[in-house]
Amino acid sequence: MVNKENYKSELRSAILHLNERGLYSASKWAAEQLMGIVMDGEKNIPVRYKYLKVNSSTRRRSRTDESPSTLGAGSNISTPVRDEYNDGMDNDYYLLAKSYFDCREYRRAAHVLRDQTEVEECELHFLVEMFLLSRASYDEKAGEKRKEEENIELEGPLGKSDALNQELVLLESELSVLQKNGTIDSFGLYLYGLVLKEKGSANLARIVLVDSVNSYPWNWNACAYHELRLHNESLAKYEHLEGTFGYSNYIQAEIAKVRYSLREFDQVEDIFEELLSNDPYRVEDMDVYSNVLYARECFSALSYLAHKVFMTDKYRPESCCIIGNYYSLKGQHEKSVMYFRRALKLNNKYLSAWTLMGHEYVEMKNTAAAVDAYRRAVDISPCDYRAWYGLGQAYEMMGMPLYALHYFKKSVFLQPNDSRLWIAMAQCYESDQLHMIEEAIKCYRRATNCNDSEAMALHHLAKLHAELGRSEEAAYYNKKYLEMMEDEEREGPDMVKALMFLAQHCKEQKRLEEAAVYCTRLLDYTGPEREQAKNLLRGIRLEQSSSPAMDIDQFPLE
């Protein structure tokens, strides 16, 4: 005689084993067969009605912490902990719904669970099923999958459409009631935060997500939505965590990203090189590494990285962005745009792809497309200073400095320690349309305090003060510019201008020996400045008539 209980037990075990190994279709098949077994004495009910039958006899109570954690004002329920992996998992409805969920059949999952939650609030199944039910509603009934399909149908020139998630209001209402009643756990709060964020209620979403993290700190997804841009504070906390999680690649990657935001490229490069040696097939976060290699024009290293991620997993947004950076560095901007578009086909909310594609359109002088791409980026994340900066550049190219200044101000608010942003603002103020020189000087001064590695701000400060007739200030900044170039053993493009100004200024101030030194340095250059330096040296010799005559022959005039 067939032992149906044994079949059911074996099928339940098979579902778990298949699911553990990622065999989701086979797991779904087993779950459907489990639901298809008619027990002796049970009326053969059509499956569509059987799903609506509440069967709480197989549910088990779960063990919770002795003292439930508090969720602020959000919930009085702590997240349960299973005694064993299989305990509490023998509910057939749950297993079937979970198998549908894993196969991305969200409507089917929601349908199975819709009437399976009328049990005591502290049971594990209630909490888990409520999360799956709500998440299935979020992904399917609430319109996420349908919205993606509409995006494909309605997309504009850059994939932009007005498709919206139409049913978030209902889901928000359901989750709000659960939160007020205290019958929602940390995972439900996480989902509620997602819904609020999607609807644009960013502040309330942040509060709910903080409650979720406080209740269950291991849910990394809830933490990932916090972008407070407190870089130094974040760096201190991550370095503190290193004491406990010293071998965590995730912690190292987060430190690298914070240092990237602080533009500490040497340290970022070292961290990512170590990450790749420990985890050679890592694709996650490697697009940040590619940005560093791109900025430093490390062509060979970027080529190697692009090849490596292509061989590892070419159908990842990160991989497409890395390859896009590679072609951009080669000057093949059309091909670069193609890969950024491919990244957006894989994930149309991938922030870096929109921003980088905007940069490429700027290079191609396609300002309209660049503005569109940057606007999509700031729609996804208003905290992306690069997109605001890109918008400023685009409007500056179109000869609209007031618009450009507006966007540069937004970018500098988000990233106040980036000298490039202050310099961009200063150049807007300096433009012929605005000609606000004093404001430009203030911005250049801020840039000098923000690690202006190219010394551009110092040169511009010297030039503007000279134009305003402030020769002493101009001389001060020219000296600072020369000192910076000498300390770093670099030859800047404006060194000749600085030397010539200082030579003439010192001569006018009767500091003839100092003027002669600057003239001597100018003799090492070619061009008209060399001849001007010779004439200055002759003038200096004439003015030193009361002193021993200077031997002009000591300077190589030919």
Image (spheres, grey):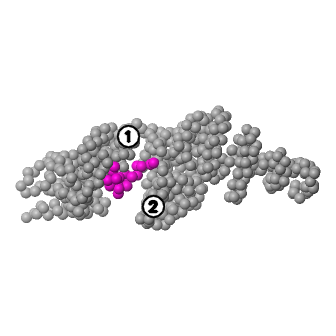
Q: Is residue 218 magenta?
A: yes
Q: Which residue is mark 2?
A: 240
User: What residue is shown at x 87% (from left), y 57% (from top)?
Assistant: 555
Q: Is residue 5 magenta?
A: no
User: Residue 201's mark?
Assistant: 1
Amino acid at pointer 2: His
Q: Is residue 132 visible?
A: no
Can you tell which of label 1 and label 2 is closer to the viewer? 2
In the image, 25: left or right of 475? left
- In-front residue for pair 235/370: 235
User: What residue is shown at x 17% (from left), y 50% (from top)?
Assistant: 119
The answer to which quarter of the image holds residue 550 is bottom right
- In-front residue for pair 375/401: 401
The percent position of residue 312, horizontal first and vertical second, equals 45, 61
User: What residue is shown at x 71% (from left), y 55% (from top)?
Assistant: 483
Q: Quadrant of the C terminus?
A: bottom right
Q: Earlier in the sequence, mark 1 or mark 2?
A: 1
Q: Quadrant of the N terminus?
A: bottom left
- Is 273 rendered above or below residue 432? below
Amino acid at pointer 1: Ser
- Chain part drawn in magenta: 211-228
In the image, 129: left or right of 430? left
Spatial distance from mark 1 to mark 2, Cα to Cα?
32 Å
Q: Residue furthest left?
A: 41
User: What residue is shown at x 58% (from left), y 45% (from top)?
Assistant: 421
In the image, 424: left or right of 71? right
